[in-house]
Amino acid sequence: MKIVAITTCPTGIAHTYMAAEQLEKAARTLGHQIKVETQGAMGIENRLTSQDIQAAEVVLFAAAIEIEEQERFDGKKMVKIGIQEAIKDPVAVLQRITH
Amino acid sequence: MENVERHTAGNQYSITFRCPLANGFHARPASQLAALTGRFASSFLLINERTRACVNAKSVLAIITASIQHDDSCELQISGTDAVEADPILRRFIEQELPKGDDQLPPLTDAPNRPWPRLLRQEPLEWLSGRGVSGGVGRGIAVISTAAKLWYEPGMDEPAAAVSMELEKIHHALARVRQALAQQLQKSSGGVVAGILQVHLAMVEDHALHERLTLEIEAGRSSGQAIRAVIEHFSHSLKNAESAYFRERITDLEDIGGQLLSAIYGRPKTIQEITLSAPAVVVAENLTLRQFLSLDRRFLRGLVLEHSGTTGHVVILARAHAVPTVVGVAHARMLLLPEREIVVEANLGRVIHAITPAVQRYCELEESKQQQYQQRLLRQAQQRAITCDGRSIEISANISKAEEMTEAIEHKADGVGLFRTEMLFLNRESQPSEEEQFAAYRQVVQAAAGRPVIIRTLDVGGDKPLPYLAIPPEANPFLGCRGVRLYPEFRELFMTQLRAILRASAGSNIWLMVPMITLCEEISWVRERINDTLKDFQQQGIAYNPVLPLGIMVEIPSAALSIAQLATEVDFFSIGTNDLAQYFFAVDRDSATVGTLGGVRHPAFLKLLRDITRTARRHGKWVGLCGEMADRKEHLPLLLGLGLDEISISPAQIPAMKSMVRRWSQSECRQLLKRALACRTAVEVEELLKNVHRNVQALPLLEPELLRLESTSCSREEVIKELADLLYINERCDEPLLVEEALWTREEVFSTGLGYGFAVPHCKSAAVKVNSLGLVRLQQAVSWPSVDDQPVDSVLLLALNDREGAEHHLKIFARLARKLMHEEFRRQLRSANNNESLCRYLMEELEITIPPDRNE
């Protein structure tokens, strides 16, 4: 399955990237395709393009603060979880949203 | 200056101005004004237009009772025979010198009511509140001072003797106190203490004080009664001053009154000396200058004052000596029990008087933080001071007594850059023998253990007459017979010193330096005397160092401009900036009127220094610099830019100076010097130095010192404090308490415990001076809210300054965050067994590169 995700946290220097790493790892394990955009202290990195978004079957937000440029996802199926959940058990998270 | 106006009417002159001093027309500028007006026969009236106070401007006491505050409109009226000469001089003083008269210490900022540190927040506490004026935490037994300031003395009740006898007693007392102050002033190494002593000296010499004392005695009072009456009179006028700054001067007056009384009656038994014999916190209403200076600072851990002033001299001194101090603690002497342990938390302005286990632990951690900070400085100071681009510079000590060598060695001096030998000659009736001098020089070189010791031969003149040295009085001793100029006439005195030094040179690293060289002929003369002496030594079989380096103090412009010629005669040069600046600008730096003209930061002076060092280096000669210029940290980049081989400073400053050197690169400093040389004024150079200071961030993100592998912290609170303190110890933040708060603020959003026994507290805060990555590994895991509810034993700190432009550091942190999600990385962090290997591992994994300018 094709997934796009965004991770973000208050200071934007640690949890954003931990969650991104965890989700990418879990997707590999489960055989999904994932692209994770990080919204951290360096701004938006690995930006999701409109093609990415269009191709995705599900959009995942792992966030402790507001997501920037959310309007990009209008009309898509969106799931929001706490960023700690993504760090703690990313496999369970992906299984839940792709069942 | 447009707010100074001048009016003339016959031989009356009037200068109107607005007071430019933020603290008002306080004691130091007042003593400068009084010294200046005192030179003229005319009378001087200073009028405060706001209060209508009209006072004699020849009296420092009268000037401060006029209570002139910042921006008050004032008028100085001059009338008399020499008013026409006085007017331009006074006008110049008011326009140019007065605005510079404020304190050297930065103004105290009003610290907002800070919360207790987390470690103490959950605990029951007992404390008194006040205002912290000199930071730090000190713990000791309370020593409560009950000393009265201006005491009652039974002898005072006795009827006055004849007026002439009482007057004689007063004059004698004034002379004694003046002499004692002058001696202290000479011993003080300048700076804050000297400034305060000068004010006291001006007060003792005050015309108004003398006049009033005379009047009281002529009215039938005894000398003791007169002193009390006069001090009370002046204190009374000061008590009504609106400005706390002026009210504070009452303490100074009472101090002087007390000294005058003890000069007449001896030290009374009712006055308790504050003696400290164990770590102590002194609790007092207020302290006099003399009381503070007499405290044994080995044991002094803190000060608690009921008096709430922040501008008193004791506060200024406490700040200069870094004694944790809280003021304005109401009823402290009543509320605190003598001999009980108390803690001064001066960062928070509090005095804790019940030592609970948490307070105990807090103090231990604070103490250990300070120790580690000092140890790190000393450890680093043991190594040579090398700039981050690999240029090394010797940091040596200025000493004036053999005993001071201990301090120099403790502070890791690379050598002695200036041993002033005058102390051996002063305050005695006959000159020191060759043996006595030999013993003193030997003592120094033995303590120096092979490090170079530059001994400067006797540098006296008509201003410091020695009883056994009949120097004829001169109108201007500073331009007269002094230093080397005396030697031919007092040949025996010089030869004795020379023999002592040459004998001490055997098997040691003594360098001989001659002061006040004006011309090449003088150093040739000295060279001949050395050769004569060595010939004698050879015949007599006395040992000496045949390759003893001979150098000169460069302190006269003619010598400064003859370096190429002098280089054929000498082996080294040491620039004496104090005298060189005075002779260069034709300015007495103690002068109230012109003392600040020019100065060592003036581009013209910097150019002179540049030419001296450049020429000396071209001739392959070693160049050092001694003098107060080197003591000031903000000058360091200029001195590094000059490419000096050495600077010589007061011993206590050495570790911090060495640490500063490591933060600069010489190429950067050379550029800075170039820019300073292109400046137009000293003020422009000062601005340049101020701004460049903030841009320097030569420390890397990660170094082995930021990794602590066996921490004994036993709670989340302690770990976070430890991390903040780690930054402080490594000079990466000044206020660890603020970093701690920033970490907690983030921690409160949601805990940074990420599972697997790891936590990553982080912050972005202005309190962080240098972006840092730290690690603390705990001996015992602590409870820390985590994703997997497991305790935490490995804690990583990510600390960022809030400035922009640290993109590459953010990238490293992001990389670190991702790596932490991998078991192998975590295992490596847990198992590494020393700081260096762990540091190397992290640098490789996180792709941390050493900035190119740190490659040597």
Image (spheres, coloured by chain):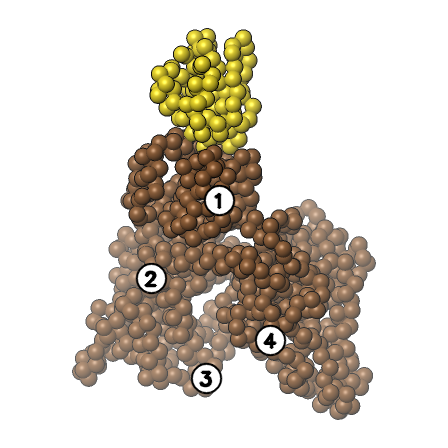
The residue type indicated by label 3 comes to Arg
Q: Residue at x 38, y 31 (%)?
A: B821
Vertical comparison of A23 with B709: above or below: above
Residue B573, x across and y down, in percent: 33, 61
Question: Which residue in the structure is indicated by mark 1?
Answer: B783
Vertical comparison of B610 with B809: above or below: below
Residue B98, x across and y down, in percent: 64, 56
CA gap, disc 2 to disc 4? 37 Å
Which mark is first along the chain, 4 or 3?
4
Q: Secondary structure at mark 1?
A: loop
**Residue B428: mark:** 3
The residue type indicated by label 2 comes to Asp
Which mark is first along the chain, 4 or 2?
4
Disc 4 packing (10 Å; few <14; some 14–19; many ≥20): some
Q: Secondary structure at mark 2?
A: loop
Image depth: mark 3 or mark 2 in front: 2
> Is the C terminus of chain B in the top left, top right, bottom left or bottom right quadrant?
top left
Question: Which residue in the structure is indicated by mark 2?
Answer: B414
Report in which chain the residue with disc 1 lies: B
Image depth: mark 3 or mark 4 in front: 4
**Residue B274: mark:** 4
Q: Residue at x 81, y 83 (%)?
A: B219
Which mark is first along the chain, 1 or 3?
3
Report in which chain the residue with disc 2 lies: B
Which mark is first along the chain, 2 or 3?
2
Q: In the figure, the yellow chain has which letter? A: A
